[in-house]
Image: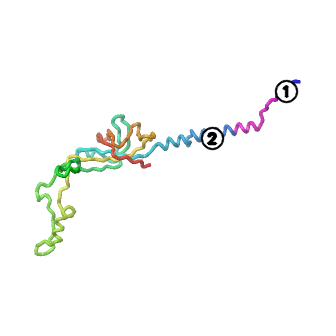
Amino acid sequence: MKKQKQVYRFNLIDAILIVLIIAVAAAILYFVTGDDGIFAKAKNDSKSKVHYVVELKTVDKDYLKNIVVGDSVTETIRSGNIGKIIDINIEPSWTITTDTETGEMKKSYYPPINAPQTSEDCTVEVEDSEENGTLDENDLETIGETVTDENQNFPELEYDYYNVRLTIETEMDYTGSSYTVGGYGIVVGYPVYFRTPTYVGSGYCIGFDVVE
């Protein structure tokens, strides 16, 4: 006597199970790859707001007015935007010299172009404390504080060249080992070649800070 083969029949429970499996798979797929998924979040998290500082050496005084806060900065090799200037710090140009007597390294500024040439160029008005015109100890102390005395008429020193530090803000991609903007890497100690609407120059990155 031959055994009859059992025929499996598709029922409602099977349909429910299949629907549940599909729903769970879809949910997992969205959680991983959707707009709010972990891959998308990881991609968004790789974007960071960065402030970096570029130092320009011996900038001619006549070009200082061309460097403006708010100007966009373009990298000159690939012509990609690498941020905007948010702060400018200017100081007279200097160089490192060695004291021949002590051997110590020190910062030496270049001579100003309008340094006082005579004692008349840097006089200080001092009022006598006594009616007879003699000076007392307070008057002598006042004379010694000529640098801070509000009555001084020292001319404001001007120089031919200045060092300029630009703080630049931009959004950067973090690749796991470096930060880049438009494919251009910004690394402390490396040169940055750039232009703004009114200035073209180059300098070295001397500071880097991830702010967000």
Residue, disc 1: 4
**2 vs 1, front mark:** 1
Mark 1: amino acid: Gln
The x, y position of residue 212, in whole percent, is 44, 48
The x, y position of residue 46, in whole percent, is 47, 42
Q: Camera-side residue: 65 or 79?
A: 79
Outermost residue on the right side: it is 1
Of pointers 2 and 1, the one earlier in the residue sequence: 1
Residue 18 sits inside the magenta stretch: yes
Would you call the spot at circle 2 few (<14 residues within 10 Å), some (14-19), or many (20 or more)? Answer: few
Give me the residue at 23% from left, 47% from top. Answer: 96
Q: Which residues are magenta?
A: 6-19
**Occupied quadrant, residue 173:** top left
The x, y position of residue 112, in whole percent, is 18, 50
Assess whether mark 1 and mark 2 are in contact (beta carbons under 8 angstroms).
Answer: no
Above or below: residue 108 compared with residue 142:
above
Residue 98 sits inside the magenta stretch: no
Give me the residue at 17% from left, 65% from top. Answer: 144
**Occupied quadrant, residue 139:** bottom left
Would you call the spot at circle 1 few (<14 residues within 10 Å), some (14-19), or many (20 or more)? Answer: few
Residue, disc 2: 27
Q: Quadrant of the N terminus?
A: top right
Above or below: residue 55 compared with residue 152:
above
Mark 2: amino acid: Ala
Q: Camera-side residue: 199 or 142?
A: 142
Q: Which secondary structure lies at badge 2? A: helix
